[in-house]
Image (cartoon, helix red, strand yellow):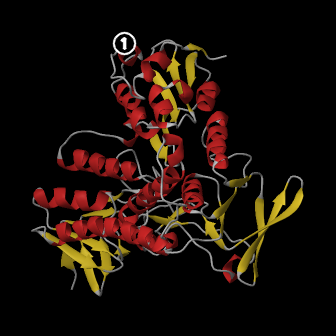
Amino acid sequence: MPEAFDAIVIGTGQSGPALAARLVEAGHKTAILERKLFGGTCVNVGCIPTKTLVASARVAYLARRAAEFGVRLGGPVSVDMRQVKARKDGVVAQSNQGVTRWLKGLAGLTVIEGHGRFRAPHAVEVAGRVLEAPRIFVNVGARASVPPIPGLERVEYLTNSSMMDVDFLPEHLLVVGGSYIGLEFGQMYRRFGSQVTVIEQGERLIPRDDDDVSAGVKEIVEAEGVQVRLGARLARVERRGERTALHLECPGGPQEVVGSHVLVAVGRRPNTDDLGLEAAGIQADARGFIAVDDELRTSVEGVWAIGDCNGRGAFTHTSWNDYEIVAANLLDHDPRRVSERILAYALYIDPPLGRVGLTEREVRAGGRPALMAKMPMSRVGRARERGETQGFMKVLVDAASRQILGAAILGIGGDEVVHQILDVMYAKAPYTVIQRAMHIHPTVSEFVPTLLENLEPLA
């Protein structure tokens, strides 16, 4: 016999638990389902663990540079990878257990562990039970995409998830994919002590960004000894004893690179292929992302898709914003739309990249009159004090409205500093609001007004 609920949330990633709590608070009898790890990707194999590992790698990096700052250490710097993993596991456990305790202790919320699948538009089967509800929210997330490369199935390879189990130092890590995940792990393991080669099929790293940003990122990672192969298509994978050979098709002819371990980091795919979308009549695109409108409603009345599975953002912050949009429209009678948000993300190499709004390439393609300013981080006092002068700041402004169109801050504090630009963009205020503000010295933020003083027409 089906069990009746007012609402069902499938998945406990970033947006699911908060929405379930709001539904319960509003008096809705709610069930939330989780098939594996409470907290989803971010908590268990994404943001929290990777940034914890990045922090350990940064300490190793700074320790090796201690002499530059007049600090003497007792001997060569070494990294205990088991301890690094143990620290990461401890941080993850705090978050995972926190989400689990919160949900299971929430009065009025039914928590069911098991894989949920649609049996009908408003019926879900899980753990031998059938649940029905007029409102269902799909929050099933995404996982690493593994392309059909000949020979890959016959070798052991790593993904961003299985990297979380690594408690040893790979001798030579081959990273397939030169975008966000691949670059973060590449620099991280180089700092831990591995030899690292990043293989990118495109002509530059992080192809969604501008040429100068891609070049700046490449310069940063190569300066630390990461080898970068661009324009290299992975044609075949071969196991050679204890090592793995990657056969590459390159502009100059076939090449080969051999390493001890392979990390496949070529994108993400939604966890929708075993969700029973067909039984519910829910439309998805060719890649499996659930089609949604500007309020995150699917093609089926009373069903929403939130988080990574809807293809409207692949970040923890976009997932959280999905929750806010759905809750505002459904519970607060406060109209909010996906189209209202401004693109914002960061690349957590060190120093990081903070990006908001349009790229220079997009502004040029749009054809609108615009202004641009660019400044090297070497001019920033905080960067010089820390001995971290790599990168630059760049901002683009609409010439008519004087509103900021986009910005890239590649350098120390870039992931934080970029938010002052983002906030002014949301306020639809002219760039002069920042340009005329008095900022604290010595900081990175104080140079944003200086940057804006040097705007020139985009040639």
Residue displayed at 63% across by 80% down:
156
Q: Examine the rendered structure and indicate whether residue 375 appears above or below residue 194.
A: above
Relative image position of residue 391 (x, y in whole percent): 57, 34
Q: Choose between 376 and 6: the one closer to the eye.
A: 376
Secondary structure of the residue carrying numbered label 1: loop
The amino acid sitting under disc 1 is Arg
Q: Which residue is mark 1?
A: 436
- Determine the image quadrant of residue 262: bottom right
The quadrant in which the C terminus is found is top right
Relative image position of residue 260 (x, y in whole percent): 68, 74
Q: Examine the rendered structure and indicate whether residue 38 appears above or below residue 21.
A: below
Q: Choose between 8 and 390: the one closer to the eye.
A: 390
Residue displayed at 64% across by 54% down:
178
Number of marks in picture? 1
Answer with left or right where residue 105 lies relative to residue 422.
left
Q: Examine the rendered structure and indicate whether residue 340 appears above or below residue 283.
A: above
The quadrant in which the N terminus is found is bottom left
